[in-house]
Image (cartoon, grey):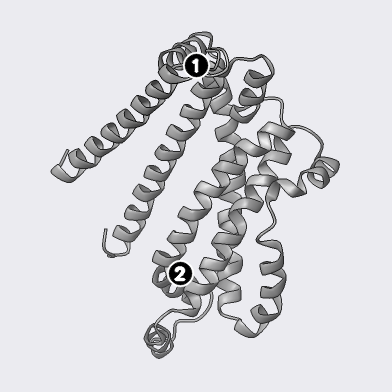
Amino acid sequence: MNLKKLISLKNVVISVAILILIWQIAFYFSSYDKALFPSPKMAFDALTEMIGNGKLFENIKTSMCRFAAGYISSVFAAVTLGLILGRLPKVFQYINPAVQLLRPISPTAWMPFIVLLFGIGDVPAIVIIFIAAFFPVLLSTVSAVGNIDPIYLKVSKNFGIKQPELTWKVIFPAAFPQIANGIHLALGTAWIFLVAGEMVGAQSGLGYQIIDARNNIRADILLATILVIGLIGILLDGLLKLIEKLILGSWGGDV
């Protein structure tokens, strides 16, 4: 492990330690009943309990399967459509107003219609994730394609490179760094709305576990689940950065 990684790990440990310390101080001076506002130790005890009975890993597995299905399919669809629309600016100028109209609407606002169409279960949460990730990736891809240096296209034309090779071998690699920013943004948004979708449209998963803990007045389990959700979010972001570096490295870019 190099020095840069050690420093980064140290920063994470210190940041988490400070957060837990603030939590403990707030608990110590709080006038709320501990059943409503538990201490860090109570939350960690609840975490141990969930690990012991297998409930936590079962819900993590369920949530991750939903997230993978919704997020990966959304990124694939948005990048593909964005690469096409980015090369058709006159077409996109008619589509963009509709995109800008739909983009600010919270994906959970569509939940009644999603449940009406797909029922209760995995599909509504997957659809929520798809919607949450789609627009950031689509718009970043269209913008990235539009900002490509024209020299790439001129050189490609001189070498006789045509579609679809032009898109996947020239345009996509050149636009990828900016596309990756949209994919990063979409990751956090999609993870947030996975939990929100499971809280209102599922009978399993981490979001449902939060609702179940609230209904059973188990604030310790609720806070432990929140910590797990945050930790998984950090791990997903780190994994995405690693994948991005591997892709850029394979193309000879800066990593």
- How far separated are the C-alphas under marks 2 and 1? 49 Å
Q: As shown in the figure, which amino acid type bears the numbered disc 1?
A: Pro
The residue identified by callout 1 is: 38
Residue type at the position of mark 2: Phe
* Residue 188, above or below 47: below
The residue that appears at 37% across and 43% down in the rendered structure is 238
Residue 145 % position (x, y): 49, 75
**Tag 1 secondary structure:** loop
Residue 92 on image: x %, y %: 65, 78
Residue at image point 40% right, 37% down: 235
For residue 172, which numbered disc appears in the image?
2
Query: Dividing the picture into quarters, in which one does residue 119 lie?
Result: top right
Residue 95 location in percent, x, y? Answer: 70, 75
In the rendered image, residue 169, in percent from the top left (x then y), is placed at 43, 71
The correct choice, above or below, for 154 with respect to 112 in the image is below
> Which quarter of the rendering shows the N terminus?
top left
The front one of 76 and 232 is 232
Q: Is residue 103 left or right of residue 186?
A: right
**Which is more N-terminal, label 1 or label 2?**
1
- Residue in view at x 41 percent, y 25 percent: 23
Q: Residues within 10 Å of mark 1 (few under 14, many from 20)?
A: many
Image height of 100 relative to 192, above or below? below
In the rendered image, the residue lying farthest to the right is: 116
